[in-house]
Image (cartoon, rainbow, N blue to C red):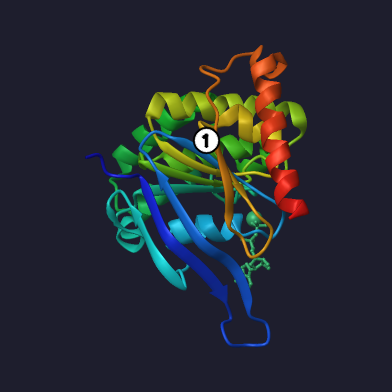
Amino acid sequence: MTTHAVRIESVSKIFNPGRPNEVQALVDIDLDISPGEFVTLIGPSGCGKSTLLRLIASLIDPTGGTIHVNGKSAEQARLDQDYGMAFQRAGLFDWRTVARNIELPLELMGWKKSERERRSKEMLELVKLGEFGDHHPAELSGGMQQRIAIARSLSFSPSLLLMDEPFGALDEMTREHMQDEVLRLWSETGTTVVFVTHSIPEAVYLSTRVVVMSPRPGRIATTIDVDLGGRNDDTRAETPFFEKVTEVRAALRAVEAA
Ligand SMILES: Nc1ncnc2c1ncn2[C@@H]1O[C@H](COP(=O)(O)OP(=O)(O)O)[C@@H](O)[C@H]1O
Ligand SMILES: [Mg+2]
C-alpha cells in the first residue's frame, strides 16, 4: 500500500466559533492525493481554497476531521519540513541578494555555508536564472521574482509543494511561461503539487486532477481528471484542452447556480 502524499478526512473549519463574526469556511472535506499528482483547487472567491492549503500546511488547525501528509500528522510534516510554499506575492527580502534569498530556508535549517551556496546555485540553474545570484530582487521582473520564490520553496527538496495563486499578479504571457516552468520542475523533481487558482485554463493546463469547490461554506463539489498527456506549445489550441476547459467551467457554473 502506498502512503498518500495528502489525506484529508471529514475536515471542517470554522473561524471564530461561537462569536458574532463566526465563519464556516469548510465543511466535510475528503480528499486523497497520491505522490506525484498535480492537483488544482478551483472555486469562487471566498470558498476556502487558501484555508484548505493552510490546513494542509498545518499553519492553522481544522475544527473537525484529520489531515495527514506523507502518512504523518500535518503538524509533524510541517516540523519535518516536508513541504515548500509559494504565494501570489514572491515575498523576497530586498536587502538580501537573490542567492541569499534562496538560501534563507536552508540557513534556518542549519545547513553549512558551502552546502547552502552549492544548493542555491543549483536552484538558480533549475529556474534558468543562473547569472542573477548576486542581483537584488528589485532589479528583476515580476516573473523572475516569482521564479526565485519557487526556487526558494524547492531548495530543500520538499516532497510536497503548496502554491496559492502564485501567478495571479503576472501578465498573461509571463503567466503561461511560468506554467511551463512549473510543469518542467514538477516532472524533473517528482514533487507532489497542490495548486490554487481561479483561472480555468490554468487549472486544466497544469493539473492531473482539478478539484472544484462550491461557494462558502466550501465543499468539494466534484473532481475532474485531466488526462492530456505531456503539455507543449500546441496543447492550449487543441480540442481535448477546450473540452476539459468547458467541463470545468460547467462544473463551476453548476456550483454557483446551486
Ligand atoms: N483568519 C480568518 N479569520 C476569519 N475568517 C477567515 C479567516 N481566513 C479566512 N476567513 C474566511 O473564510 C472564508 C474562506 O477564505 P479563503 O480560504 O481565503 O477563501 P479563498 O482562498 O477561496 O478565496 C472567507 O469567508 C474568509 O473571509
Ligand atoms: Mg485565497
Quadrant housing residue 202: top right
**Residue 55 point in image, percent of width and height:** 47, 61
Residue at mark 1:
209
Tell me where residue 206 appears, x and y as whole percent: 57, 30
Q: Is residue 186 left or right of residue 163?
A: left
User: Looking at mark 1, is its residue's CB closer than 8 Å to ligand 1?
Assistant: no
Task: Specify the quadrant that holds the N terminus.
Answer: top left
Asked whether, in this view, residue 129 is left or right of residue 89, the answer is left
Q: Is residue 235 placed above or below 154 in the rendered structure?
A: above
Residue 113: % across, % down = 32, 44
Where, by quadrant of the figure, is residue 103 drawn?
top left
Residue at point 37%, 39% (across, down): 34
Please indicate, yes or no, whether residue 37 appears anywhere in the rendered image: yes
Q: Residue furthest top?
A: 234
Residue depicted at x 64% and y 49%: 89
Residue displayed at 43% across by 35% down: 37
Q: Is residue 87 found left or right of 159 in the rendered image?
A: right
The amino acid beneath tag 1 is Arg
Residue extending furthest toward the left? 1
Q: Mark 1 falls on what kind of element?
A: strand
Q: Nearer the viewer, residue 183 or 116?
A: 183
Quadrant of the rendered image holding ligand 1: bottom right
Q: Is residue 175 visible?
A: no
Residue nearest the viewer, comparing 186 with 151: 186
Q: Residue at 77% across / 34% down in the picture?
A: 171
Q: Nearer the viewer, residue 53 or 7?
A: 7
Count all numbered tags in the image, as a single digit.
1
Label 1 environment density (alpha carbons within 10 Å; few <14, some 14–19, many ≥20): many
Q: Quadrant of the C terminus?
A: bottom right
Residue 100: percent from left, percent from top = 47, 44
